[in-house]
Image (cartoon, rainbow, N blue to C red):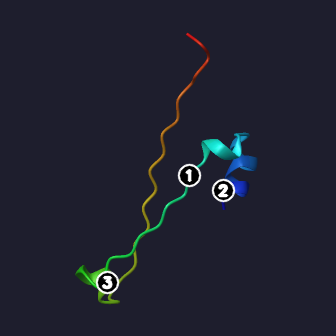
Amino acid sequence: MRKNLTDILSADLDQISVKATTTDKMGFIGKGEGIAATAVVLISNNNGS
């Protein structure tokens, strides 16, 4: 997944982090009554200024 993102974003592998977690049977997602996906992205321009 990280490799695919680096190719798409033209980024270095060490600039990409992918994390996952579980709901530990909490809420409707943990009970198997639904699903969810969340994405958080931070994009910055480090051009030396």
Query: Which x, y percent locates residue 12?
Result: 71, 41
Left or right: 21, with 15 as reference point: left
Q: Quadrant of residue 36?
A: bottom left
The percent coordinates of residue 15 (x first, y second) are 62, 41
Q: Label 1, label 2: how many angstroms apart (C-alpha)?
A: 7 Å
Q: Tell me which residue sits at (60%, 47%) in the image.
A: 16
Secondary structure of residue under mark 2:
helix
Front residue of 28/48: it is: 48
Secondary structure beneath disc 3?
helix
**Rendered-image quadrant of the N terminus:** bottom right
Tally the numbered discs. 3
Residue sitting at 55 percent across and 57 percent down? 18
The amino acid beneath tag 1 is: Ser
Residue under pointer 3: 30
Determine whether label 1 and label 2 are within 8 Å by CB.
yes
For residue 17, the mark is 1
User: Dot 3, how many residues are within 10 Å of its Cα: few (below 14), some (14-19), or many (20+)?
Assistant: few
Image disc number at residue 2: 2
